[in-house]
Image (cartoon, rainbow, N blue to C red):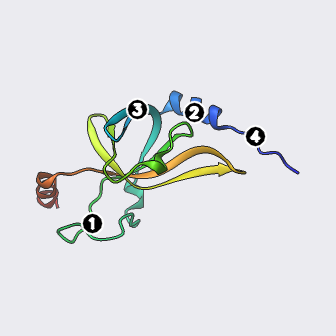
Amino acid sequence: MIKILDKSSVIEQYLKNIGQSVILIKNGKPTEVSAVIEQTWKRNKSRFEKSNSEIGRYFQGYYIYYGPASYDITSLSEDDTAKIDGESYYFVQSESVKAGNVVQYYRGVLKKAYGEEGYELLQNEQ
């Protein structure tokens, strides 16, 4: 039987070295983690939302999050947010990445949070 080694601490150190500061806010309580955030501009055909927005369109502004095993993003609700470089985001999808049954890191899809004025700005850009 092959024993799966827990590499989560090595991955977390890697994220600290190359990642950026992300403040995850759950139930109003902030926690700072280091994570890698990848823009999805190369994946413009990906559809991450289950339904259209209130005005019937999909918006860009999606990012892939790779974060440490020490913070479970799958427990975040729709009202919880992530702050990156002063901007607010929320998770559209999240999952744990495991080797064996050991969580090595978390991956998720972030969407930039736009208020009502944000929808107007996006319409003007297109």
Whether residues under marks 3 and 2 lie with C-beta atoms below 8 angstroms apart, the answer is no
Look at mark 2 in the image and give the residue it sits on.
12
Please rate how many residues cluster around mark 1, counting C-alpha atoms within 10 Å: few if below 14, some from 14 to 19, many from 20. Answer: few
- Tell me the CA gap for discs 2 and 4: 15 Å
SS at mark 3 in the image: strand
**Quarter occupied by the C terminus:** bottom left
Q: Are marks 1 and 2 in contact (CB under 8 Å)?
A: no
In this rendering, the answer to whether 47 lies above or below 98 is: below
Q: Earlier in the sequence, mark 1 or mark 2?
A: 2
The numbered mark, 4 or 3, whose residue comes first in the sequence reads 4
Residue 116's quadrant in the figure? bottom left
Q: CA distance from mark 3 to mark 2?
A: 15 Å
Label 1 or label 3, whichever comes before in sequence order = 3
Instruction: Tell me which residue sits at (27%, 66%) in the image.
Output: 58
The location of residue 115, given as percent across then percent down, is 17, 51
Query: Is 67 drawn above or below residue 79 in the view shown?
Result: above
Q: Amino acid at mark 1?
A: Tyr
**Residue beneath label 4, please?**
5
